[in-house]
Image: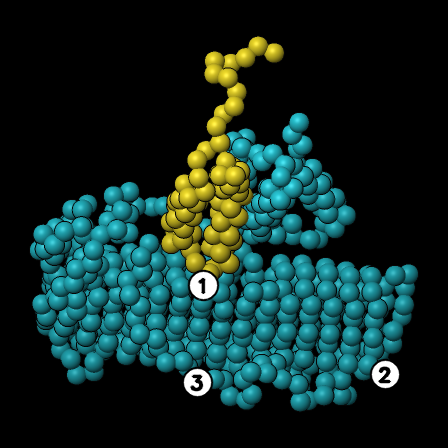
Amino acid sequence: MRRGSVIGPLILILIGGLFLMRNLWPEIPLADILSRYWPFVLIAWGGLRLIEVLFAAIMSKPLPRNGISGGEWMLVFLICIVGATMYTARHYATWIPVTGAWRGIVRGMGESYDYTLPNSEKPCAKDCRVLIESFRGNARITGAADATSVKVSGHETVRAFQQSEADRANKDAPLELIQQGNDLILRTNQDHVSERAQVSSDLEITVPAGTSIEAHGRVGDFDIQNVTGNLDINSDNAGVRLENIGGNVRMDLRRSDIIRAVDVKGTIDLKGRGQDLELQNISGQVTIAGTYVGQIQFHNLAQPLRYDDPQITLSCEKLPGQARLALGEFTADNMIGPIRLNARSRDVQISDFTQALDLTLERGDVSLRPGKNTPKIEAHTRSGDIDLALPAGAKVDLKASTDRGEAHNDFGAPLAVDETNRGATIAGNNGGPQIRLETGRGTVTVRKSSGDEVTFPDIPSQPKAPKPPSPPEAPIKQ
Amino acid sequence: MNGTNYSLVQAIRGPIMLITLGTLVAMDYFGVYGFSRTWPLLIIIFGCLKLLERIAGVPPRDTRPPGGSVV
């Protein structure tokens, strides 16, 4: 007789538990958690079955013929499909295969052959436009104030199975610089190569400083500095590093590992999704619409910031200080409002802000420390603690309430605590701006700020110096 | 003896593949390494387990008489 596995009943208990959780605590973002953590169900399943098999082996009981039966693999397949769909819908998966199968084989198993590209140069007016056509590889573009021509050099890497195929691919993909009116087109001809080889180019491009650049890339990094014209970068997968840019920057990157921009005079308009994002000393307006899952940092933005992500939306008028968004948290110091922040699940800490703050969270703790002139504040969270530190003697019209939890008034008069059934309210008015704090479940604290609290403990006073740009990476294999 | 080893290796193959699959997908989701880069590990591990099966010995002989039986 074969005793059944414990996995079946456990899966039933898990499903029941999930439904129960949904009914009892609807505020927990269950779909979010499931879409991210479902692979651990597979790991746990495999682990339990492994223990069962080993246990049976030790006890010298008959072993099952297969650890996981055919029907169970079907269930695994189903879980993978549902889980991956949920994840794609919420976070965008990045490993959906896109290119031809043969190319993939060549990329993975072929050899790599290197060729040096001949230097090419074309005259170019001071305000000309350089158009880089879609290519695979990295480009480093540098603006030179006294240059009157565009110079291109670099090398080409061909992946192929044989030297002869690589040679042919290198010949089929010459680098061309074509003048067309005021435009200069840079063409790598990489797509003229047969299916049996894949070409990527690493380009060093020098342009007159006033040039505008429009670049299209498939896979590879862009490293652009000292250019005063506008930039328009469009890529399927790119890391972008910009430094000392005079014009407006537009970027549409379907995927990126890092985007860094330092010292940009114009506006920044960013779309797409990726990992890390770092903007520093930006004089123009910053508009970001996309999904960035890594570390996001802003320093010294002189114009309004709009950040729009499925998980969090943020806008403010100016950011002389800095703001950092990382997994599950938002920290900002020295921000000028009106500030609007709307997030699903995040711990928020904002210090030294002025004008108005409008904060809505579904879940997360809030810690606020306004500047000397207390602004108007509206903060709501459905579940989480709220901590407000006011300067001593601040004038406020305050009402802070929790539906379930305690309230602490460490500020003193004129505020007073009023405890209700399960919750509590702190209220008081001495004729200042209106402050409304609300939490569905959690502790509310209003206190005097001590003055020596630091928002970014790792960065004592000045914003940190920019990291030196890392050398361009080798072409990304995909 | 060899037969037991053989069926043990065969029995743990499924669970180990499942754990590997789950780990690779989780690594992709948490941004360690993309699944697009790590998927060959699935083949490698499958190959290793097959190899282990061969090292573990001969498959246990099917003791049932050929041609089915009447119960």
Q: CA distance from mark 3 to mark 2?
A: 43 Å
What is the secondary structure assignment of the residue under circle 3? Answer: loop
- Identify the amino acid type marked 3: Ala
Disc 3 + disc 1, Cβ < 8 Å: no
Which residue, given by chain and number where applicable, does mark 2 sit on? A413
Which of A10/A123 is in front?
A: A10
| Badge number at residue A9 | none
Both labels 3 and 2 in a single chain: yes
Q: Could you tell me which residue is drawn at 54 percent across and 30 percent down?
A: A71
Instruction: Tell me the CA gap for discs 1 and 2.
Output: 47 Å
Residue topped by disc 3: A465
> In the image, which lettered chain appears yellow?
B
Q: Relative to residue A138, is residue B39 depicted above or below?
A: above
At label 1, counting other C-alpha atoms closer than 10 Å, the crowd grade (few under 14, some 14-19, many 20 or more) is some
Q: Could you tell me residue A145's position as x and y percent?
A: 20, 82
The answer to whether residue A319 is seen in the rendering is yes
Q: Is residue A316 left or right of residue A198?
A: right
